[in-house]
Image (cartoon, helix red, strand yellow):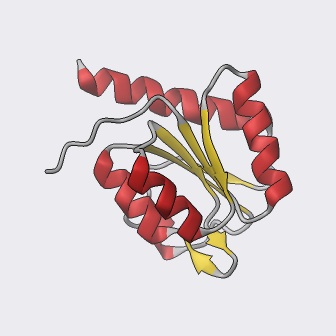
Amino acid sequence: MNFVSLSSRILIVDDEALIAFDFEMTLVDAGYDVLGPATSLDEALAMVSEETPRAAVLDIDLNARPVWPLARKLREAGTHIVFVSANLRHEELAGEFRNEPQLDKPVCESDLLKALKLGLKEQATHCL
């Protein structure tokens, strides 16, 4: 396994800029440091080639391109992933990503923060 140093930042990826910036404001207000937001798959892949985030909030369909290549790369690096989408009926979510939090849009701030906190807490437990 290739071990990558995780930054303390949270990556936000959503092709709807207003939603991405809303997520950013929510996370910043909660005390998180944000990477992005990225509004396309290519932009997000470029960001994670420079820095591996501690967690990521990912929309699934990015301008008709699925987020799976990015999600696989992040999971391999140990990044906690929270999927946020208006369409949670993807076979990948029922299969390879079944253990990752999945939130249906529109997302309540408290649900997003809870999903992040639980995953980050679990991630910290694995490091002990």
Report the number of discs: 0
Q: Position of residue 57 (x, y in %)?
A: 60, 48
Q: Is residue 65 above or below residue 48?
A: below
- Kindly indicate the quadrant of the structure image that contains residue 113: top right
Residue 98 placement, left or right of 110? left
Q: Quadrant of the C terminus?
A: top left
Using the image, determine if residue 99 lies above or below residue 70.
above
- In-front residue for pair 94/23: 23
Outermost residue toward the left in this view: 1
Identified at 49% across, 40% down, the residue is 55
Residue projecting furthest to the right: 18
Residue nearest the observer in this picture, 11 or 46: 46
Q: Does residue 23 appear in this view?
A: yes
Q: Quadrant of residue 62?
A: bottom right
- Residue most extreme to the front: 50
In the image, 127 versus 96, the foreground residue is 127
For the point 66% across and 19% down, which residue is it?
A: 31
Q: Residue furthest bottom?
A: 64
Asked if residue 1 is positioned above or below residue 16 in the image, the reply reads: above
Image spot of residue 40 (x, y percent): 64, 68
- Residue 48, given in percent of the width and then of the height, sits at 44, 53
Report if residue 107 is visible in the image: no
Percent from the top left, x then y, of residue 12? 63, 48
Determine the residue positioned at 70% across, 36% down. 111
Above or below — where is 48 with respect to 109?
Answer: below
Is 37 situated left or right of 25 in this image?
left
Left or right position of 122 against 11: left
Q: Residue at x 79, y 34 (%)?
A: 25
